[in-house]
Amino acid sequence: MPKVAGVDSSTQSTKVVICDADSGDVLAEATAQHPDGTECPPEAWWDALQQAGDGLLGDVVAIGVGGQQHGMVTVDERGDVVRPALLWNDTRSADAATRLVQELGGPKAWVEATGSVPLAAMTVTKLAWLAEHEPANAARVATVMLPHDYLTWRLTGQTEPVTDRGDASGTSYWSPATGEYRTDLLELAFGRVPQLPRVLGPAELAGSTAAGVAVSAGTGDNMGAALGLGLEPGDVVVSLGTSGTVFAVHDKPTADESGFVAGFADATGRYLPLVCTLNAARVISATAELLGVSLPEFNQLALAASPGAGGLVLLPYLDGERTPNLPTAAGSLHNLRRGAMTRENVARAAVEGMLSGLAAGLDALRAQDVAVRRVLLIGGAARSPVVQAVAPTVFGVPISVPPPAQYVALGAARQAAWAYADGAAPPHWDLGETTVRDDIDETAGEQIRAAYAEAQSSLYG
């Protein structure tokens, strides 16, 4: 019974799971926290991996790392970190993103080049910001990596940096369609081309640790979740964590010049069109805090309100927003009328607003010819009874809620098992029993989505 390890180095913490390589059964897991904020010293991720993996990694045969996408990790010629990594949720490069889109000739030119229109989240814009605002640091940069690349690099003894096609596709200087770096775009943003990680195939090994443990290519967190869930065509994941994501596997690259859908690659050789919002689970926790209630009490309040929340609509842009591209936006509550201003309606509006933003992501995937037959709901907020009750109506399709699990880490572990066995396909792992909800109120769903769209249009056009 060989054991493999999967790592999820997310925004807030590092999770390590130990799995049976054949069945996928989770044998052990641990977590260590990261510093809060929109930038982070990469060494903190390494320390968290050591802490979470302490006592767990001694008898594994392989390890894979899934990591938060887009983060900018810079090291100098000696291998020392130049500055704290700018994370995906750092929006200081919004102006740089706008300028880069214009300099290449508009959104269409970018999606043809890299599958995505660069936003403040993406690595290429962060490098442009660094070159403009911290030229001394920019001059020191010898190599640019992503968060998962950095951890793989440390695990393999800081040899040649490597990445995978899934995470590379989130930089906006690598093309999913051609499988090549677009160094001209990197030069446009940064003024020169530093060393970039070599892009490995889905089942290719990155190397091994000093103890001889095989290290797989790793991938981005969304690609890791897709692999952990074993997505098939027609499955769409809605992940409700710090951010909200909507993604699906697809058989061809996508190119949405509106910028709504990012045309990523996945971790298996296919593609992963994805919509990401900055605001998801924290909308619920922030609203519960505003109302002065616990999360169980919040659920009771929201369930007590009728669909449509008495006409209240929350645009949940509490931390700005990535999709739609509104980095300086703020949250706003619309249609305030005396009869509707109850705690129950405010709670319900928070849930419906969060889900309506993600429902717009489903529509955007459909516009890219992605089949949407069911939604798999994952992430911390997926366990909320009110989210499970409201989601089928807002999304307009049945939802399945897999058992609670660290799916990014499971995907990384599954990749490690695949690479270690040198197999033709990832091993089949059974997720276990899922909860299915297909109680859809189509009329209410249409009204909720229309009210959300009207509020958004009235404020932002």
Image: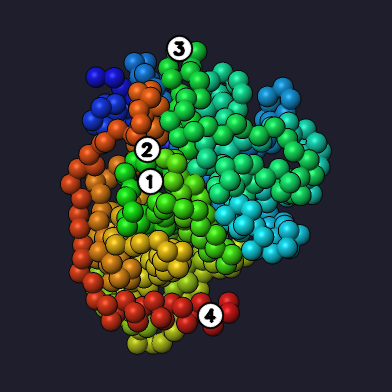
- Distance between the Cα atoms at labels 4 and 3? 57 Å
Q: Residue at x 46, y 64 (%)?
A: 368
Give how far across and how far down residue 444 sits, in percent.
Answer: 29, 79
- Distance between the Cα atoms at labels 4 and 2? 38 Å
Marker disc for residue 211: 3
Identify the mark nearer the N-term, 2 or 1. 1
Q: Amino acid at mark 4?
A: Ser
Compared to 340, does 225 lie above or below?
above
Q: Nearer the viewer, residue 413 or 44?
A: 413
Identify the mark nearer the N-term, 3 or 2. 3
Give how far across and how far down residue 121 sits, in percent.
Answer: 59, 53
User: Which quarter of the picture shows residue 26?
Assistant: top left
User: Which quarter of the picture shows residue 55?
Assistant: top left
Marker disc for residue 64: none
On screen, residue 98 versus residue 175, left or right, reads: right
Q: Amino acid at mark 3?
A: Ala
Residue 64 appears in the rendering: no
Comparing labels 3 and 2, the label whose residue is closer to the camera: 2
Which residue is denoted by mark 1 in the rendering? 226
Compared to 340, does 363 lie above or below?
above
Q: Residue at x 48, y 30 (%)?
A: 217
Comparing labels 1 and 3, the label whose residue is closer to the camera: 1
Q: Are marks 4 and 2 in contact (CB under 8 Å)?
A: no
Q: Amino acid at mark 1?
A: Ala
Marker disc for residue 457: 4
**SS at mark 3 in the image:** loop
- Distance between the Cα atoms at labels 1 and 3? 30 Å
